[in-house]
C-alpha cells in the first residue's frame, strides 16, 4: 500500500506543479479580466439606453417651442434613433472601428441634447415651457442619468485597462497569446470637445 502511495505522490505533485504553472500563465486571469470588462460594458449600454428612454419625454416639454425651432427636437429624435441602433457585443469591444461608431453616435446625441437645453433656457421666449410641472423633474432625471453614464464609462475603462495590462504582462501574456489569442480591448474615449461633460437642460455647460 505504501509503495502504491509512493508511486502516486510524484504524479500528484507533477499535476499540482503544472496546474500552478498554468494558473500563473493567464489560464484563469485572462478570461476573468475579459469577462469583467464585458460586464462593465453591459452597464455602459444600459446607462445609455436609460438616457435614450428619457428623451421621448422631451417632446411634451418642447410643445411650447416656436415652430421654426422644431428642428432642434427633430435633431434630438434622429440622434436618439441612431444612438440606439448601434450596440456592441463583448467581441466588438476589440474592434476600434465599431467602438468609434458607437462613440460618435452617443456624442452626437449628447450634442443635440445640449442644443435642446439652450433652447429651453430662453425663458422669455418660452415661459410656458418653464411652467410645465414636470420640467424640473425631467431636467433632474436627465442630468442624473448623465452622471450614471460617466460612472459606468469610468468603471468600464478601468476594467479594460486591467485586462489590457493582464494580456501584456508576464507570465499572463503567455496564456493570453498561446491559449486565447487575446487582443486588447478598446477604451471609451470622448472624441469631441466637451463630450465628457453632461448636457444640461438649463442651458449651462
Image (cartoon, rainbow, N blue to C red):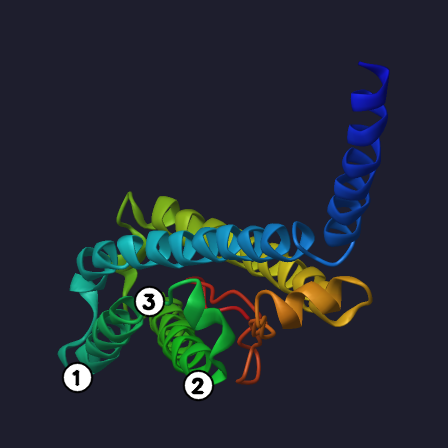
Q: Which residue is the site of mark 3?
A: 87
* Callout 1 touching callout 3 (CB < 8 Å): no
Instruction: Identify residue for label 1.
Output: 68
Location of residue 56 by image quarter:
bottom left
Q: Between disc 1 and disc 2, whose residue precedes?
A: 1
Q: Nearer the viewer, residue 188 or 205?
A: 188
Q: Are marks 1 and 2 in contact (CB under 8 Å)?
A: no
* Image coords of residue 51 (percent x, y): 36, 56
Please name the residue shown 58% across and 76% down the image.
189
Residue 59 lies, in percent from the top left, at 19, 61
Q: Earlier in the sequence, mark 1 or mark 3?
A: 1
What is the crowding at mark 3: few (fewer than 14 residues within 10 Å), some, or many (at least 20)?
Answer: few
Instruction: Give coordinates of residue 98: x percent, y percent.
Output: 40, 80
User: For numbered disc 2, what is the local secondary structure?
Assistant: helix
Residue 78 image position (x, y, % from top left): 21, 76
- Upstream in sequence: badge 2 or badge 3: 3
Determine which residue is flagged by label 2: 97
Amino acid at each position: 500500500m505504501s509503495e502504491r502511495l509512493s508511486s502516486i505522490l510524484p504524479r500528484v505533485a507533477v499535476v499540482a506543479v503544472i496546474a500552478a504553472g498554468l494558473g500563473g500563465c493567464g489560464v484563469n486571469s485572462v478570461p476573468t479580466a475579459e469577462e469583467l470588462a464585458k460586464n462593465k460594458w453591459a452597464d455602459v449600454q444600459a446607462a445609455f439606453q436609460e438616457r435614450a428612454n428619457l428623451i421621448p419625454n422631451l417632446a411634451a416639454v418642447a410643445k411650447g417651442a416656436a415652430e421654426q425651432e422644431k428642428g432642434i427636437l427633430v435633431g434630438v429624435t434622429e440622434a436618439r434613433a441612431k444612438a440606439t441602433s448601434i450596440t456592441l457585443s463583448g467581441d466588438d469591444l476589440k474592434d476600434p472601428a465599431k467602438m468609434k461608431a458607437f462613440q460618435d453616435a452617443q456624442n452626437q446625441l449628447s450634442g443635440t441634447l445640449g442644443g435642446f437645453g439652450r433652447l429651453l433656457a430662453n425663458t422669455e421666449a418660452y415661459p410656458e415651457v418653464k411652467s410645465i410641472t414636470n420640467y424640473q423633474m425631467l431636467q433632474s432625471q436627465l442630468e442624473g442619468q448623465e452622471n450614471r453614464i460617466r460612472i459606468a464609462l469610468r468603471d468600464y475603462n478601468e476594467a479594460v485597462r486591467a485586462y489590457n495590462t493582464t494580456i501584456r504582462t508576464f507570465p499572463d501574456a503567455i496564456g493570453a497569446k498561446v491559449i486565447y489569442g487575446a487582443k486588447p480591448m478598446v477604451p471609451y474615449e470622448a472624441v469631441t470637445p466637451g463630450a465628457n461633460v453632461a448636457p444640461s437642460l438649463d442651458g449651462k455647460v
